[in-house]
Image: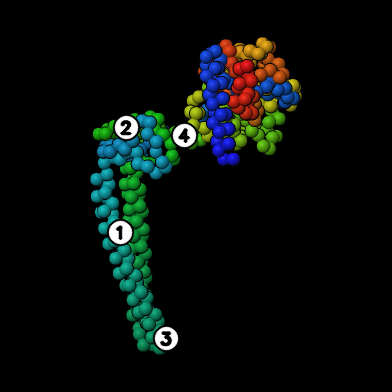
Amino acid sequence: MANLLIRKKRLTKSLLFLSLMFISNVHAQVVRYSEVIEKEEQEQIRVIGTLKAYQKANIAISESGLVTEVFVNDGDYVKKGDRLLKIDDRRLIAHVEQLRAEHAAAKENLKAAEAESERAQSDYQAYLTSQKNNAVSKQQLERSRAEANSTKANMFAAQQSVDAVKASLTLAEVKLSDTQLVAPFSGQVVERHAELGQWLSAGDTAFKVTSFDKLEAWLDIPERLSHLKHSEELSIPLQSASVLATSNKVKVINQIDPRARTFKVIAEISHPGFMPGMSVSAWLATNAKSSTLMVPKDALIQRGGSYFVYKVNTDGDKQSAQSVPVKVKFHRSGLVAIDSTALAYGDKVVTEGNERLMPGPVVAVPDTQVSSQSVSENVN
């Protein structure tokens, strides 16, 4: 039984090979097809927008100084917190060390002042007790009170000195940390304005960084589609060049431009084929429904700014592929709604093998399966 199965598999492969050899001899191309369908869908209109980076920033230096190190170049990808450049920090390091020493000395002075104040307060309390028993004079009590108040004032002054030095030290440490410029978010360096040895003043832009993992499509929507703002879950198909993607995270800006009579919709998208600055198209549903022709998205070929599909024509036992221009209306769940005077419901359109297909003889098999039997039947 096992040998019989092996022989059947070999026979099937041989038949498929012979069929394909015969096809190549008559210059027919093997393709898969699907049929054009007709569906009732909500009418959709095409709107145009621009892709923008989700985050972008002109990153400026906070401290003036001479650039001593540059860690990135144009086009480099960075993560949040990565170092971008460093300016000369020697003076600030010395200043920080000086303030740390002053802070330590101020804390020692405070410690001594606290001890002196505690002693003076204790003596004063003892004089108060003795004065009740007439053991000390009034003058001695007053001197003790004055000393207690004086040492307490000295303690407060020492505390203020510690606080002042600490504040200066904190500021100096911040200034020192600002001598290193770091990426505020993950992204790509698209512009570099700093060079080694260059003097940068506080506020000078050193780099321009944009995020690359997420983009936003900013779309101008006609006011007649204001019903979109009431949609709880809004999904928008987007296209830029030949790249198609769908955004499921959409924000509607509820403000009409009085001149253009449009409002903004921001659709968040993540796709490696999209870049900031690209023009983007979107298809938005209206409230009306109509019957429309639809083909699988794999049937659609774009060249330049035009779209077309390959229609499979049958003449007796011969099949041929014909290029048919179409107008794209909108995209929906793997299908594309089209307008074309040369296509009708039930027509066959090529869905696989159309990338390099040229008009001419073809062997077309259904998109559901390809078998040696179906190939040989089409050849015969």
- The foreground one among 216 and 7 is 7
CB atoms at circles 1 and 4 under 8 Å apart? Answer: no
Question: What amino acid type should be assigned to the residue bearing mark 1?
Answer: His
Can residue 34 be seen here? The reply is yes
Which image quadrant for residue 28? top right
Name the residue beneath numbered marker 4. 212
Location of residue 129 with respect to 315 vertically, above or below: below
Q: Could you say which disc has been placed on residue 163 in the image?
A: none
Which image quadrant for residue 193? top left
- The foreground one among 218 and 243 is 243
At x 26%, y 49%, the residue is: 93
Question: What amino acid type should be assigned to the residue bearing mark 4?
Answer: Phe
Name the residue beneath numbered marker 2. 194
Disc with the residue nearer the chain's start (1 vs 4)? 1
At x 26%, y 41%, the residue is: 88
- State the SS at label 1: helix
Disc with the residue nearer the chain's start (4 vs 2)? 2
